[in-house]
Amino acid sequence: MAAKPKANLHALPELKNTSDDSIALYLKSKGWKQNHTLTDVRLVLGFSAVIIAGGTFYYDYTLGFDKTKVMTLYAVIAYFVANIILTWWIWGMESGKVYVGSKDGVTITISSHTEKHSPIYHLKIVSRSPGQRPTTTEVESPFTSWFDTQGFLVEKPFMTFISNSIPSMAATTPEGQHLKSKPKPKSTKKA
Amino acid sequence: MDALGLSKLRHLKPRQLLSQVLNFALILSTAFMLWKGLSVATDSPSPIVVVLSGSMEPAFQRGDLLFLWNRNLELDSPPTPGTRVGEIVVYNVIGKDIPIVHRVVRKHQGPKTPLHLLTKGDNNHADDTELYARGRWYLDREKEVIGSVVGYVPFVGYVTIMLSEHPWMKTALLGIMGLLVIVQRE
């Protein structure tokens, strides 16, 4: 019970983050292999900068300002260059992507975003199959479709939403078929 | 069925943990590197200091925040604009740890030779020879002075004086911050 994903219903970022996290978990359970390159590059860039700062602190602390002056100058430059690259990576390359993964040769990239004061979850899914042009799907759904009144993420409607949004899954998964036979569950929607 | 997967796998997220650690570390390291950048730019080991005593009143009060510049050593030839009489400098006497903010009242020697200064607090009756290293009657501009005052913000440094003079405040501050962290979790 305690491990069930839960979000504060009054915090939009929390709703988004909880949903984002659940995408990867759900797709993993469906046999998708997540590609962590974007995150790993960010971590390497970020921690390199932190290590530069840590080293600067250590040498400054042990040797004093005058002996380390020149080294500190280069370290400061290197630190801020690393930070500029990191910022570029986060804004330019990651830019809201919450999942990159592949299955049976199909690679999907999922980005999510929300708009201010609007409880709608927007997903953009770019799907690449070998020998075909990438297809882009944009879908949106209110968070109330899969969060219950207490803020717990209800897995079934969320999975249905995700699997219907991914072209290569929509036709084949039970969740996808489930949706075709029944209308989308709206029972959790609040007044 | 598959629904079970979601809750079970939720625990294993080393990358998210690392990302959180990284965000926190970047805040600390950026603050530190900005300080070091300022330090290198001004050539001063401590480019921002807080006035600790009233010896420069009425110019500076306790708690004023001072910005220093330490590239006016007057060592070049031809000399660059150097430290002048009337300027306020911050110095650390070798062997003593407390930075002192006082005004330059006399210059000994000058361009090309080590610049020596005599300083005095505006609010003090005597000059600073008493404060200098034993048997010395001057201050070495290059070795002892950490910078000349080029700007100030009144009073904002008082927080640090309060924290160092009343240690219980540090405890209280830490307690409040800890409480905030706990409260924000849920």
Image: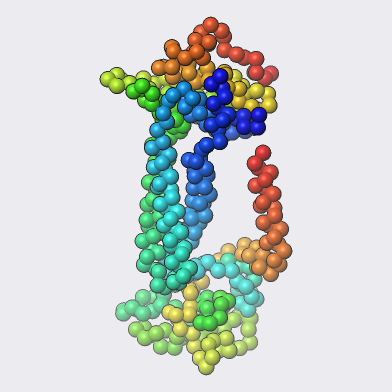
Q: Residue at x 65, y 47 (%)?
A: B181
Image quarter of the C terminus of chain A: top right
The structure residue drawn at horizontal position 40% and vertical position 52%, both measured from the top left corner, is A48
Q: Can residue B28 be seen in this view?
A: yes
Identified at 43% across, 39% down, the residue is A39
- Taking depth in this image into account, of B29 and A160 the one nearest to the observer is A160
The furthest residue to the top = A181
Inspect this view and state whether residue A12 appears: no
Residue at figure coordinates x 48%, y 78% from the top left? B145
Quarter in which the N terminus of chain A is drawn: top right
Above or below for A113 versus A84 = above
Expressed as whole percent of the image width and height from the top left, the position of residue A139 reads: 48, 20
**Where residue B151 sits in the image (x, y, percent)?**
52, 67
The answer to whether residue A106 is above or below residue B182 is above
Location of residue B164 in the rendering, given as x and y in whole percent from the top left corner: 66, 68
Left or right: A65 with respect to B154? left
Q: Where is residue B99 in the image (x, y as percent from the top left)?
A: 56, 76
Q: Is residue A84 above or below residue B101?
A: above
Q: Is residue B73 left or right of residue B49?
A: left
Q: How is the image coloured?
A: rainbow
Q: Is residue B154 left or right of residue B67?
A: right
